Image (tube, grey):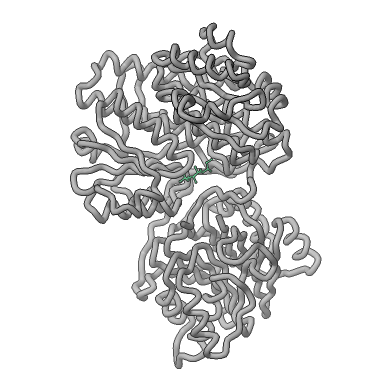
Amino acid sequence: MCGIVGYIGEKDASQVLVKGLKRLEYRGYDSAGVALMNGKMMIEKGKGKVSNLEKKIDTKKLIAKIGIGHTRWATHGEPNDINSHPHVSESGNIAVVHNGIIENYNSLKKKLELRGRTFKSATDTEIIAQLLEEIYTTTKGITFEQAIQLTLKQIVGTYGIAVVSLDQQDKVYVARKGSPLLLGIGDNEMFIASDASPIVEYTNKVIYLDDGEMAVVTKDSYKVKTIEDVELTKEIHELEMGLEAIEKAGYPHFMLKEIFEQPRSIGDCMRGRINPEEGTIQLGGLRDVMDELVNAKRIVIAACGTSWHSALVGEYIFEYLARTPVEVEYASEFRYRDPLIGKGDVLLVISQSGETADTLAALREAKERGALVLGICNVVGSTISRETDAGVFTHAGPEIGVASTKAFTAQVVVLIMMAIKIAMEKGEITKKKAKKLIQELDSIPEKVDQILQECDEPIQKIAKMFTYAPNFLYLGRSYNFPVALEGALKLKEISYIHAEGYPAAEMKHGPIALIDEMMPVVVIAATKHTNDKTISNIEEVKARKGRILSVMNDDNKDVKELSEFSIQIPTTKDYFSPLLTVIPLQLLSYYIAVNRGCNVDQPRNLAKSVTVE
Ligand code: AGP
């Protein structure tokens, strides 16, 4: 997703902006640029990496104390120099960077062309700079701030913008509607960014803008108001994350660091919430809605991607332990099908970033229809976390790698804690059983650590065998069917190998036609209650010369004998097994992608947070 940074203060703005853009690279992008003001407007931008931009800035010695920067993930207009941001008005006096999509840019562009304005790029963003200049220069007595408000009122769509103008050389203007923006409050300096990572090394004091709000920022002040010109007093939040959380800490990639962080992140997710001695669970964020949850006739879960996979795990666990009917929806489908949801229903949205446009839209749709909307998010202060009625943070720490790993396991942990708590409240499980489950849950971080220590090497060897396989099949049953989907997604998104996840029993209904000696089949055999059936599926694959790579409990001798390669993991409750079985699949996809020379942390075409539809 696009990234925005802005700075105004006493430092060399170009250095602050370039460093900030590097911290946003993990979001995925194809071009980068800055606008700096020092008596004149200095624009440097182009297709390619931030490091290329940095070289150009250094060569040209662009020194200034105020500026804005952008990393672009193309939505309108191909990735090239002219379409990269910032975009400037015809006079060159106004520069704009933008995240989001302007849906009515064509009609606005035609109107301005009729008034003689010419456009350089194929982007929607350029319309903001041009329309702003048209309003500002043709409306008598208007202030620049008012011109921004009038411009934004004509925009249909979503935006997070930062604007600088030669007429206001001590100010940066920002506004948001559907695309996140924060202000970082420094000492005689101010920072602007689309997430906290460019800000955290300078200050931990931030203000989150909400939709329909704008701010006028100078180096020692900020004024927040609605675009209807209503002044607002915003709460100053303290960032939880530290700089070390967004550094690689010696790992070659953020993704590997985050895979190996899981014993800690799972522990952090449970800390202060489970009490193994007493056999209790406290989820403070749900305290006020516990009755609605316990009495819910059904729970609908909406999410995207990996978060949708954790939702599927949640469905199995909620229905087995709490006996509450659960429906899992792709957020992108839910929002457009006039969903049957309303008062008395519960919608639970799951999102690592808390900014996914489809998931946010599903939340708003359900809220409008009267449903109680809860959230499971990893980013404090994110839009989704602020718009839900209540929720639970996963506390996994910043997840920088585009491929989600520790967020998935943390989401599953939250779903397990919710299911146990609701099951206890409903009397579906005894306190004694709950205590045993909570004690087993408490042992998971250690079991994950054991897998990471014991399986890393063997998986590197297996990865070498399959680095150039053209396809993969992932099979799982019950709680591990969603893990089969997740394992396939991990491989797809970072190694670009086509991979499909299937319920193991589904093989007979078509996919078995794909099996031959060229097809690696990853079978997750860690669900005791379906183990015999899984063995039959493995035999069906072997009979057709498929190559079996199994993820299995260390005591599953039958599966081990049938597998060409087997990765052995500790045993746990069937419904906790996704927390363990996913780890080898994360490692397998990582090492195959590295062997293929892929950009593991920033895979092609992908963004860390999809804040556009
Ligand atoms: C998962 O590895 C991908 N990065 C992607 O599918 C992601 O899970 C999806 O875009 C949802 O993101 P969210 O959890 O931030 O809403």
State which quadrant residue 192 falls in.
bottom right
Apparent side of residue 423 relative to residue 275 in the rendered image (left or right): left
Q: Position of residue 194 (x, y in %)?
A: 52, 57
Labels in figure, total: 0
Image: 219 above or below 442: below
Quarter of the figure that contains the N terminus: bottom right
Q: Position of residue 106 (x, y in %)?
A: 50, 76
State which quadrant residue 450 falls in.
top right
State which quadrant residue 466 falls in.
top right
Image: 478 above or below 301: above
Q: Position of residue 208 (x, y in %)?
A: 43, 57
- Is residue 268 at least partly visible in the picture? no
Residue at the spot x=58%, y=70% of the render? 123
Residue at the spot x=65%, y=70% of the render? 35
Which of 489/367 is in front?
489
- Is residue 18 at least partly visible in the picture? yes
Quick one: which residue is furthest to the right in this view?
A: 59
Image: 449 above or below 372: above
Image: 171 above or below 403: below
Residue at the spot x=55%, y=43% of the render? 242
Apparent side of residue 5 relative to residue 518 in the rendered image (left or right): left
Which of 200/252 is in front?
252
Residue at the spot x=31%, y=29% of the render? 318
Which of 556/295 is in front?
556
Q: Position of residue 295 (x, y in %)?
A: 18, 34
